[in-house]
Amino acid sequence: MKRKELTIYLQRIFENHNLSRKHSKISAKYLVKAELIEAKSHGVARLKMYCDRIKKGLINPKPKIKIKKLSTSIFHINADNSIGFVAADLGIQYAIKSAKKNGIGLVAIKKSGHYGLSSFYAEQAVKKKLVVFCFTNAPPALAPHGAKKSLFGTNPICFGAPTGKVPFLFDTSVSIINRGKIRRADKLGLKIPFGVALNKKGKITTNAKQALLGTQIPIAGYKGSGLAWMVDILSGVLTGSSHGGKTKDPFDNFSGPQNVGHLFITINPSFFSGNNFIKEMQENIRLVKKLPKAKGFSSIMYPGERKNKIYKKNLNKDISIPSKILKEMKDLNVIK
Amino acid sequence: MKRKELTIYLQRIFENHNLSRKHSKISAKYLVKAELIEAKSHGVARLKMYCDRIKKGLINPKPKIKIKKLSTSIFHINADNSIGFVAADLGIQYAIKSAKKNGIGLVAIKKSGHYGLSSFYAEQAVKKKLVVFCFTNAPPALAPHGAKKSLFGTNPICFGAPTGKVPFLFDTSVSIINRGKIRRADKLGLKIPFGVALNKKGKITTNAKQALLGTQIPIAGYKGSGLAWMVDILSGVLTGSSHGGKTKDPFDNFSGPQNVGHLFITINPSFFSGNNFIKEMQENIRLVKKLPKAKGFSSIMYPGERKNKIYKKNLNKDISIPSKILKEMKDLNVIK
C-alpha cells in the first residue's frame, strides 16, 4: 500500500472508532511514519491494540484534554486518557513554543497512552532548531538490578539536536532490544536473538512468548536499571502518572486505562550564541566522521541519520504489510 | 588521617597554590567527599594533577567568573578556567535558586575543568527537594560506534530526585568502568578487569597503562556511544566549551586549559503537586524493594543508597591514603 492510501485507510478506521477527524489524522500519520522508518513494531502491528482499547473504553476517543500553565516555562497536561499520539502531539507544540520564547520549556503529560516513538516528537522540536529530551514510561518489562521480576518498562531515552541538516535523533530503549520487536516476533512466529531476554524461570530464551512472560535484560546491568528507574521517575512520578510497575500493558491488561506519562524538555540553543550552535554541531559531527573506521564500517553515522535514509528511501515505495495484519485492518474497517 | 585534618591539610595546599581561601575550602571539601564515599579515583589521587595545572597556568587560581542571565530560568557562566569544583559549586546554586522560584533552572558552564563527581552537585539540588540532571564532558576515552579511535569522554550522566530520606542519586559513566579507576590502577600498579578496555591495537587488555593509551569500551555498543555523544552535545556544544574530542586530558595534556563544560537542569516537583512527589517517590521505592530478590541479593537498593551508607560509615573513620599519594601531598605542602 502506498503511504497516502495507507494514511487515509488508517484515518478512516480511527474515525470509525469515534476519534475526531483531527485525532484520527494525527494517529494515522504517526502509525505510517513508524512504517516508513521501518519501526515495524510501532506501526500497523499496533492498530488492533489501539482499536481494542477504544472499544473497551480504555482509550477515550473524545478526550477533554486540560492544559495547566504552572510557570513561565512549565505546562502540565491531563490527557484524559486520549490516544497517546494526540496528547504527545499537543504537548510537544507547547514545549516548542515555550523554548522559542523563554529559552526552555517543560511539558509533563499524565493520563496518556502509548505514543509510538519518542523520536516523532523530538524531531518536531529539532526542526524548530531546539535541543530536546523526550521521556515516556512503559509497562513492566525489565527487572530492577537485584530483583528477579519485571517492574520497569523498556523506558526509552530520546535526545535530539539540530545540525542544520538531518536531525541528530538519539532514541533508545534501555533494554537490549525493544519490547515491540519481541511482540512482533511473537505475532509473526519468529525467534528473538540469544541473550536479550529471560523466561519466567530466569533462563535465557529465544522464544518470543516465553520472553514476554519473563523479563527482558537491561543494557549494562545496574546502569541500564538505573536509567530505567530515572525515566520512571521523570515520566511517571513527576507527571503524576502510573509508575513503579503500575503502567498497564496495552496488549494484555484491559483492567483500566494505561495512564502513561510523558515528559518533554526543550532548550533553545540560540539563547546562548545565536547560530553558533549549528556551526559547532557540524564541526562536532565532522570530527567524529573523519575518525579511522572500525572493522566492518565504511562510515560513521550519527544517531538519526540511518533512520532518515530509510525514511527517504521508503517515502514513495509500497509499504508491505504482513497478511495477518492486513486481515486485522480489514476487520477493523467494517466495524460501523 | 581524619576527615577534618585532611580537609585543612588540602585547603592549605590549595592556598599555597594561590587559590583564595574560599576556593581552597570548596576544592578541599569535594576531594575529601570523594574519599569518604570511597570514590578513590576522584579524591586525593587527583591533588597533584590539580596543583600541576595551577602551577603551569592552566587552571586559573584567581578566576573572574562571569554570570550571564539569558532568560528567567537560564544562566550562562564563563568560569574563566577556574578549578572545576568552584565553577560547578557556584553553578548549582543558580540552578537551585531558579528552580525554587520558576519551577525550572538551566545553568550552562563553559571554560571549566574537572569537577569531581556529578553527584556532589546533584545532591545539593536534591536536598533542596529538586529533581536534577548534571552533565559534564571529559577527555577522549571512548571510540564512537564505528570508529577505532577514542573521541568521547566517559561523559557521565547524573540524575537526582528527592525521596524524603536518602537522596536518589544515579551517577554513571557511559563506559563500562570509570576512567579514574584505570588511572588509579595505573598509578598503583594494579590490573584492570577483563573486557573493559582495548589496547592501541584494538585487543582487550587488563594492563592499565595500555588501556589508557587505547580505548575504553562503552556500555551497550551503539547505545552507550549515543549517550556519550548526547552528553558531549549538552555539556560541550551547547555550553560553548570544548567538544568532539578537544577536551584536554588533565593528566597528560598541558597544551592549554581543559575547557570542560557542565550543564545543570533543575526541576521543582512541588510546582506539579505540592508534596505529592515525595509521597509517590516513597511508594515507587517501596514497590521496587518488595520485589522477589535475584540470586545473591538480600535487598534491592536504589541509586545513591549504597554510597550514602559508605559515607556515613567513613565519616568519623581514618581516611587511608596510599603512601605514594601521601608523599605527593607532603611535597605539595612545602611549595611556598
Image: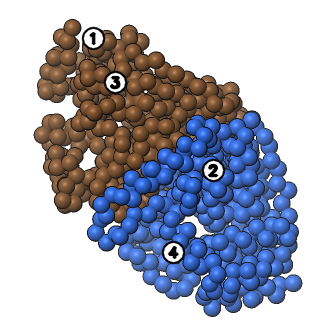
Chain colours: A brown, B blue
**Residue at 74% from the left image edge and 69% from the top image edge:** B27
Query: B241 above or below B45?
Result: above
Look at 64% across and 35% down and name the residue there: A104
What is the C-alpha distance between the residues marked 2 and 1? 47 Å
Residue indicated by mark 3: A59
* Residues at marks 4 and 1, CA–CA distance in whole angstroms: 61 Å
Q: Which mark is residue B241?
A: none
Q: Which of A280 and A328 is in front in this view?
A: A328
Image quarter hosting the C terminus of chain B: bottom right
* x then y, percent, for residue A125: 54, 30
Chain to which mark 4 belongs: B
The chain letter for the residue carrying disc 1 is A
Q: Which residue bears the numbered disc 2?
A: B129
Chain bearing tag 2 is B
> Could you tell me if residue A251 is visible in this image?
yes
Question: Considering the numbered disc 3 on the image, is that residue within a helix, a strand or a loop?
Answer: loop
Across and down, in percent, residue A286 comes to: 54, 45
The residue singled out by tag 1 in the image is A16
Q: Which quarter of the rendering shows the N terminus of chain B?
A: bottom right
Chain bearing tag 3 is A
Mark nearer the N terminus (1 vs 3): 1
- Amino acid beneath label 3: Ile
Q: Is B97 left or right of B125, judged from the image as shown?
A: right
Instruction: Identify the residue shown where x is 36% and y is 20%.
Output: A60
Q: From the top left corner, tell me how far across and down residue A77 is, in percent.
A: 52, 27
